[in-house]
Image (cartoon, rainbow, N blue to C red):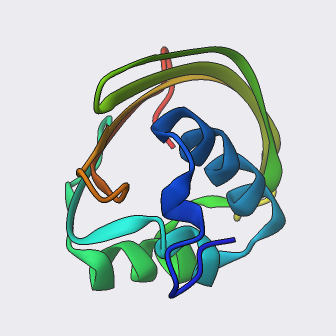
Amino acid sequence: MATADGTLRKKSPEQIARHYYTLVDDGDVDALVALFHSAVRYERQGTPDIDGIDALRRFYTGERVIDRGRHTLDQVLSGGDWVAVRGRFAGVLRGGEAVELRFTDWWHFTPDGLVDRRESLFPGRRV
């Protein structure tokens, strides 16, 4: 969990990216939003960009079409300030539709360990 004293910032970008998926699957919005820089830009395939921490919080507390589910990480690659994640998601959309899909996420980290850019791709699907 992210803390004001920077405990999470002592982790590598790869560890932080991996931790994010646990937080989102558990619905811990406060902790996952704490991973991001205030000026974050989040690009999701097929949807408008999410700019800024307030917009990111709104996304996770109401605009996200996913109701619940679990991520499985198949591959995590890191180099410098970038992390790439390939995986699968199985869950339920807010409308009740069960989904299973693949995803690819690109993460960029600031020198102090916050995510300032994220890009999500969903082959064959828009969520």
Residue 59 in sight here: yes
Residue 13 in picture, x, y percent from top left: 47, 39
Observer-nearest residue: 16 or 74?
Answer: 16
Q: Position of residue 79 (x, y in %)?
A: 35, 17
Residue for point 29% across, 38% down: 46
Instruction: Name which residue lies at 82% across and 50% down.
Output: 69
On screen, residue 32 above or below 58: above
- What residue is shown at x 30% (from left), y 85% (from top)? 54
Residue 37, x across and y down, in percent = 28, 68
Q: Is residue 81 above or below residue 69?
A: above
Residue 111 horizontal side relative to residue 84, left or right: left
> Compared with residue 70, is residue 113 higher up or lower down, i.e. above or below?
below
Residue 100 in view: no
The residue at the point 57 percent across, 68 percent down is: 32
Q: Quadrant of residue 56?
A: bottom left
> Horizontal and vertical percent for residue 95?
71, 62
Q: Nearer the viewer, residue 83 or 90?
A: 83
Q: Is residue 103 left or right of residue 84?
A: right
Q: Residue 67 appears in which quarter of the rendering? A: bottom right
